[in-house]
Image (cartoon, rainbow, N blue to C red):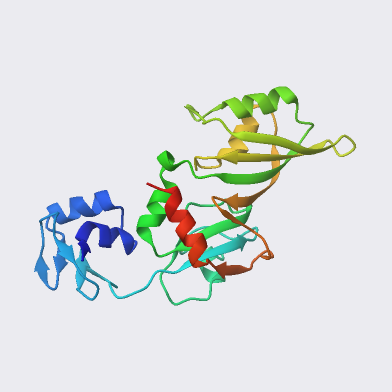
Amino acid sequence: MERLQKVIANLGYCSRRHAEELISKGEVKVNGKVVTELGTKVKKGDTIEVENTILDNNKDYEYYILNKPREVVTTTSDEHGRKTVIDLIDTTTRIYPVGRLDYDTTGILLLTNDGELANKLMHPKNNIDKTYIAKVEGIVTGYAIKKLREGVVIDGYKTRPARVKLKKSDKNKNTSLVEITIHEGKNHQVKKMFESVGYQVSKLKRTNYANLDLTNLRVGEYRKLSNKEIAILYSLVK
C-alpha cells in the first residue's frame, strides 16, 4: 500500500505536490469514490481517476536511455509533426523524457514512466551531473573557463559552479572543444553560458547523465537500464 499522491506522481500524471492539491479539491476518485484525505493509501489494481482521467495502476516501470539524434524534439508529441524522442522507442508504455535536449542537441536522454524518480532527478537540490561536449566558435581562453567554473549570469540567474575542461582547440579552424558538467537544467543553459563569455556553440552533445553514458549506443539507438543502474539513480536522489 502506498500513499495516493505518491502513486499519482509515480504514474506520471503530475508532481506529488500537485497531486495533493487535486486530492484536496476533490478531483481524485479511488474505485469510483471521491477521496480528499491526503493520508489515503491505495494498492496496485485500485482504479484511480484524476480529473476524469483513469490512470493505469497496473503497469510496471520502464527505464531507457537514448542517444538522441539531431532534429528530434524532446517531447511526447509535436503539433508540427516533427519526429519526437518517443517515436524512437519501441514500447506501448506511456513513457516520457526526463528533462530535455534542444532540437539540434544530441546525446544521452533518460526516458521512463517512473514519475517520482523523474521528478527527483530534475529537482535542482539533487545536483545531478549532466556532462556535455560543446564545439564553439573561437579559441576559448583560460579566463572564460574560469568564469564558467565560477558561474555566470544568464536570464537574471547565476549558474552554479560547473566543471569545465578545454579538450581541444584548432587555431586553423578557429574552434574549440570544451567539456562542461552542470547540475541545473535551464532552457538552452549551456549555449547561454558560453554566450555570456563571448562564444557561440555550433554543436552540442550530452555525453553523461548521472551514472549513465553512451557506451555501445550509436546515434538513434536506445537500451533499457539494468537493475543496478536504476538502483544507483535512486541512491543519488532524496
| Residue 84 showing in the rendered view | no
Horizontal placement of 177 versus 92: left or right? right
> Residue 196's quadrant in the figure?
top right
Horizontal placement of 112 versus 220: left or right? left
Residue 5 point in image, percent of width and height: 22, 57
| Residue 9 showing in the rendered view | yes
Residue 140 point in image, percent of width and height: 75, 30
Q: How many discs mark residues in the rendered view?
A: 0
Image vertical order of residue 232 relative to residue 57, above or below = above
Residue 205 point in image, percent of width and height: 66, 50
Q: Residue at x 51, y 42 (%)?
A: 187
Horizontal placement of 200 versus 82: left or right? right
Q: Residue at x 56, y 42 (%)?
A: 188
Taking depth in this image into account, of 159 and 73 the one nearest to the observer is 159
Taking depth in this image into account, of 120 and 133 the one nearest to the observer is 120
Residue 41 point in image, percent of width and height: 16, 63
> Residue 136's quadrant in the figure?
top right
Horizontal placement of 26 versus 97: left or right? left
Image vertical order of residue 147 relative to residue 72, above or below = above
Quarter of the picture holding the N terminus: bottom left
Q: Residue at x 87, y 34 (%)?
A: 171
The residue at the far right in this view is 172
